[in-house]
Amino acid sequence: MREDHLEVLLYGSPQLRRKSEEITVFDDDLRRLARRMETCMIEERGIGLAAPQVGVHRRMLIAENQRSGGPSILCLVNPEVVETSQEKDKYQEGCLSLPEVFADVMRPVRVRVRYQDLDGREQEIEDDDILARILQHEIDHLEGVLFVDHLSMLKRRILSKKLKELSRLAAAQARESSSE
Ligand SMILES: [Zn+2]
């Protein structure tokens, strides 16, 4: 295994349920982690990735920025939703930790998120499109929440076979990484 390679933890891993801690040190290690997460997300063809998904319980996420202007990948440290629209809608979500599982999730259409950049400077971003969706999904990860948690019991039951299979894979993944 390449030293720099990050592995995305699968549904069922208890690590995905742990709450992440605030970041207070903005150094080269943090920038390196952001770069490695970027590479990982691109390799896995994701549009967002939160640090706990790669086993790092720190409040950082990266997200593809499909809007014109600005960087193509955003990195948010200590992100916090400070405002949401009353209006909500459904959108089909997926997750690198739940490959091949997709479901419609109801969330506010527009969000305003306060965060710090990699130099620790306070920033704000507002969106009412896919980025708003990605940010809400990834911020959930920092709290140990997964998109399937937002589904009704009935919908979760429909997905239960896939979820059980993923939990088996996650257990195998944990055994593999502990024997490395
Ligand atoms: Zn996810």
Image: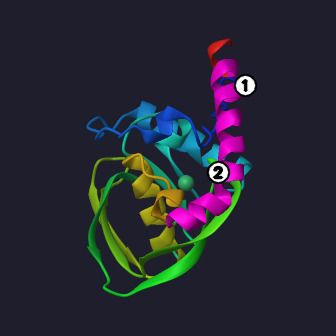
| Disc 2 within 8 angstroms of ligand 1 (CB) | yes
In the picture, the quarter occupied by the C terminus is top right
Residue 111 appears in the figure = yes
Is residue 82 depicted above or below 17 in this figure? below
Q: Residues within 10 Å of mark 2 (few under 14, many from 20)?
A: many
**Which residue corresponds to mark 1?**
2
Residue numbers of the magenta segment: 152-176
- Report the predominant secondary structure element of the magenta stretch: helix
- Seen at 56% across and 66% down, the residue is 154
SS assignment at label 1: loop
**Which residue corresponds to mark 2?**
98
Q: Kindly identify the amino acid type of the residue bearing the numbered disc 1.
A: Arg
- Seen at 37% across and 88% down, the residue is 87
Front residue of 68/111: it is 111
Is residue 111 depicted above or below 180 in this figure? below
Residue 47 appears in the figure = no
In the picture, the quarter occupied by the N terminus is top right
Is residue 78 depicted above or below 93 in this figure? above
Q: Kindly identify the amino acid type of the residue bearing the numbered disc 2.
A: Leu
Left or right, residue 119 beside residue 68: left
Residue at mark 1 to residue at mark 2: CA–CA distance: 23 Å
Q: Give percent across and percent down for residue 64.
A: 57, 63
Q: Give percent across and percent down for residue 169.
A: 71, 35
Residue 20: name its quadrant: top left
- Seen at 57% across and 77% down, the residue is 91
**Number of numbered discs present?**
2
